[in-house]
Image: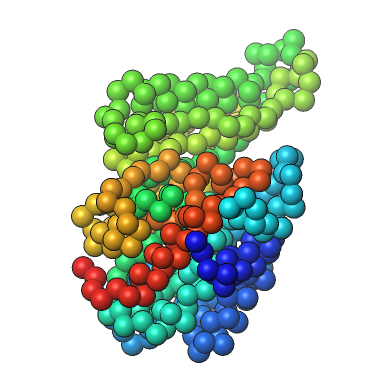
Amino acid sequence: MISSPALEFAQTLVRMNTVSQNSNLELIHFIRDHLAKLGVQSRLTYNADKTKANLFATLGEGKPAGVILSGHTDTVPWDGQDWTMDPLSALVKDGNLYGRGSADMKAFIGIAVSHAEQFLASDAPFALHFAFSYDEEVGCFGVKELIADLRDASIRPLACIVGEPTSMVPAIAHKGVYRYKCCVRGKEAHSSLTPQSVNAIEMAARVVGRVRDMAEGFERSEPRFEGFDVPFSTASVGQFHGGIADNVVPRDAEFRYEFRDLPTANAAQMQSEVLAYARSLEPAMQKVAPQTGFSFETICEIPSFLGSKDDAVTRLAQELSGEQGTTLVAFGTEAGLFKNAGIPTVVCGPGSIQQAHQPDEFVSLEQLGRCEAFMQGLARTKAFG
């Protein structure tokens, strides 16, 4: 079972409202001040309006390159969900810690920080780093700034453990998440005069159809990556808006779509295919009205992640978690960004993604106890590699 100090630290973080649309500075400053009392300085990197920050801290200055413990501080909202308790209550009941972010993923952060003194006293031959980010839930935006800051400061960590909920089973792969918005500008007209118009909805529908064709192609012929629930890349349209009246040919339409690509696939090539098809439609549109056409906006680009069971950090996570095997996860994380920055990475944390983002989100105290044992073992580690 988890110790009282570690549980209380996790509860404190869960009680802070860090939904992505809000500031996370209360949480970041709380951790910064806790570490400062231990003599540890934190590097903060901010968003454009200084309402959110990442935190990076090193425990064991002067030691060789260290191992990152990584987590995101933001949560998804709970509007419209049927909770039976206050989402910020951090209630402990029936062997579980409840609350928004309990599983995803404040408990991991809280347990890690609660062991800062143990890490500082550790004889491990490497430093420990905390890397806590903002805006993961809306596109992994914060961690990109954090990684850029590490590069600029010539900080080169040895490895990274991302504490997303994997039931403490080390995960070595996940798909990427790429989302885009397409806006279509047509030319309106009375619906009795359609030849004088460009119907934005109909043009958008053609591109939506191409996205669907691509999805069917992935399912039909893409080489499988066994271990994923869906062992091929997927594509889907999530939102569509357009039109103002039945008898007005619509001038504007907008839709949003996503690709979830296998680690062996090429998401940039997928998006290029959509762009090329849209551009092929524009000449006919612009014969009617030169100002018509398509524009695209990137919503988020979260790269896929592919580690290895043979990586030293994976073997370390297996040893510390007591798990002999590894797994793959369906959800996106910051792991691909760390890996692409040249940092060997594994995903391993307490709780299940089945509880994340749900009403009455929870993580079991048994899982938190395993996570605490993981941290204690990390502090006792004598070798890496």
- Quadrant in the picture for the C terminus: bottom left
Q: Indicate the position of residue 133 as horizontal and vertical percent values.
A: 52, 64
In the image, residue 236 sits, relative to residue 169, either above or below, namely: above
Left or right of residue 141, residue 250 in this image: right
Q: Indicate the position of residue 218 as horizontal and vertical percent values.
A: 36, 26
Left or right of residue 211, residue 338 in this image: left
In the image, residue 349 sits, relative to residue 372, either above or below, namely: above
Q: Residue furthest top?
A: 192
Quadrant of the rendered image containing residue 54? bottom right
> In this rendering, does residue 237 appear at all?
yes
Render colour scheme: rainbow
Residue depicted at x 62% and y 42%? 358
Q: Indicate the position of residue 6 as horizontal and vertical percent values.
A: 54, 69
Residue depicted at x 34% and y 31%? 231
Residue depicted at x 38% and y 38%? 261
> In this rendering, does residue 281 appear at all?
no
**Count of numbered badges drawn on the protein:** 0
Judging depth in this view, the residue of 1 and 259 nearest the camera is 1
Judging depth in this view, the residue of 184 and 349 nearest the camera is 349
Q: Indicate the position of residue 363 as horizontal and vertical percent values.
A: 55, 52
Quadrant of the rendered image containing residue 48? bottom right
Left or right of residue 362, residue 309 in this image: left
Residue depicted at x 33% and y 20%? 220
In the image, residue 114 sits, relative to residue 107, either above or below, namely: below
Judging depth in this view, the residue of 159 and 256 nearest the camera is 159
